[in-house]
Amino acid sequence: MSQLKARISVMPLHAIVMCLSALLSLVGMFVPMFELYVQYKKQRVYSLFSLLINPRVHVQLRQTSVNLDFQMFGAWIFTISIILSVAALTLALGFQLYSDNKKKKSFGCFSVMILLLARLGMHVVTLSGFISEKMLLDNNLTDKTLYVAQGLFGNVLFVVLFLGIIASLYGALGLKFTMKQLSYPYIIWIVLFTVLPLLLIIFRAFFANNNGTYRFTMDGFKHLVEGRIIDTTFYGFKIHVQMYFSTFLTSLDYALWTTLGCFAIGYPLAYILAERTKRAHKTSSKLLLLFVLPMWMNTMLRTYAWRAFLSETGVFNNFLIAIGAANQPIAFLEPGSTTIDIVIKLVMISDFLPYMILPTYSVLVKLDSNLSQAAADLGANRFQTFSRVIFPLSLPGVISGIQMVFMPSMTFYMIPDIINPSGITVGKQIEMVILGESTKLQQAGNAMSLILLIFVIISMGILRNQDKEAGSGGMTI
Amino acid sequence: MRFLKRLLPNIYIGLVLFFLYLPIAVLIVFSFNKIPKSFNWGGFSIDNYARLFQGSDGGQLLDALLTTLKIAAIAAVVATVFGVISCLGIAYLRKRFQNLIMNVTYIPNIMPELVLGIAFMLLFSFLNIQKGELTLILAHIAFCVPFAILSISPKMKQVDKSLSEAAMDLGATQWQTIRLVIIPEIMPGILSALMLTFTLSVDDYLISAFNVDSSIQTLPMVIYSQTKLGVNPKLNALTTILFIVIFALLLLSNLSSLKKDSKKAKS
């Protein structure tokens, strides 16, 4: 027994993965993983075992009832699956625990791989073979209205079996494990979920999807350029601009003001907090927590609360009337008024403020307090100390704060939308067209996403350069 | 004058806190509102708490809450496990390659959620995957993985390589070295990655909105659709409860760290 334990403890990683995968292929038969849909309604969730026990299914629908009979199918698929799984598990454990010969081990891995492949094949066959022609004919249904889909556990089993096959292939080839290899899945992941999606944004701006085939088109950009010219007012000026450009201008206006406001309010605050932390170590870092806590409250609900607070029958108006500052309710949220723009900017500042305070604080708190003393000794007054020493050194924090506020406030369209449902911002525009029905507008949405992506990359590039300069500037001081 | 100078920062802190907590206070007060779907005050009632998950609106709320928690739990665990494995591997790559990978990891981190959501949507349509629960979970995992890696990799950098070499010299297998030496060292990073990815996933609206069909609704989606028609005060009640739970957890963890500090100071 102790020998067995020792053998398990020196088992290589790929063997463990292989054994677990084989084990799960057995356990998986008793876990509900197939979902039966009749006319788009989920009726039941099956495991192979539950199918064996209960092969006849009677489903009562609104007008009709459906009789399904899985009898033979369930029995033979269960038998084959259980043979495959048990064999895979025995081989995987047996060769790993009771054989020392390298060649035998790799042969064991190879046979386990074949068995797991067969089990995976069985899993897929089960999914597609659930519904027979007879069942469809008997119940007057089509394969679109009666189908079986894979549930969550089914997908998990799929992934696990796939991992097991890779692990056993690994063992069969007799590769040696190095730590480096652990990063290979992530490299594939990066290609699939970071590089490919961003390339797709570029690709889809120029190519329209035509039932699986892609064809080159400039329709999206044409639509953007052709859009109507509208008259709007921008800071009191009447301007005559293209519709999409005016939307972009509005969003940019919000984002700039939000960033500026967050900086103006957040920087002094971070400075005060950092000074406190330096002086008295314990309590003030807890104070910071109070500024982070609002982030855990849903942003949209907070925004809605602002709307409730400032509405015509809201608390603020009642308060103003009660103290006699106003005779009648003030319509702060009247669409198209200047106050609503100010309210939107204020709410956005209140929502994004913690994102500015945190990075600025974390840089400021690390600054050595001797620095300002040295500056003072060298004859700088307090303003000079701040503008020449402290501020340049805190720039990296400010810049990462701007990064965390500027782009999100430009694209997080829910805040302006909740305060002013009739207004349109870039994000809302893109969401409207891209999730809409019209293919032409979808193409325009793809084009807009590309433009937004380019804008993001440019602004991030500028900020990064600034960051580097600030870093080197800090070094020379 | 000096008194004023000392008072001024406190006043400033107080004002900013007021600005930040005003909407939260309004939200909490309105969770006791008697009339549904309105921002007019209709009288005090604790009905919203007492019958939180009852009735059809409560049922919808419970469904959305469970979906959100389920997806966040899956996304957080998978992203963190994957992040740990990747970080282990990345640490042993060549320096140049390592920098390249970390730079690419930063990309989704600084991209606005809107762009990421659209990018994932285009990816799934390119791969011919129907929108649904699977795409929602995949998108959440994909969005969480970089965050997990970015919070684990600093800890991984602090791990002394000679430590694992020593373990191997003493006869530990690679798997044992990872399990017994490296993982305990990077545990704080793993925990913070779990927390971060979970909260990100719970709070996310934009990525979900682009990657599901109408059959699934997460809590933020319910909130957004309700802000158009008038928010049900039960939603306020639910978020208030969640807020208090988080507050209590933070307080507890802070208290325990304070206790540890004082113990250290004593010894």
Image (spheres, coloured by chain):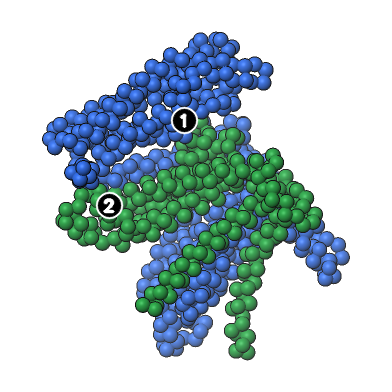
Q: Residue at x 63, y 64 (%)?
A: B20
- SS state under label 1: loop
The residue singled out by tag 2 in the image is B178
Q: Is residue B179 above or below residue A219?
A: below
The tint chain B carries is green
The residue closer to the viewer here, A76 or B223, is A76
- Please indicate whether residue B203 sits to the left or right of residue A107 in the image: right
- SS state under label 2: helix
Q: Tag 1, which chain?
A: A
> How far across and down, in percent of the image, does residue A275 sit?
50, 78
- Please indicate whether residue A398 sits to the left or right of residue B24 in the image: left
Amino acid of disc 1: Pro
- Please indicate whether residue B127 sits to the left or right of residue B52 in the image: left
Q: Residue at x 80, y 54 (%)?
A: B42
The residue closer to the viewer here, A242 or B153, is B153
Chain in blue, by letter, is A
Location of residue B222 (image quadrant): top right
Do badges 1 and 2 share one subunit? no
Q: Which mark is residue A32?
A: 1
Crowding at label 2, few (<14), some or many (≥20) Cα neighbours within 10 Å? some
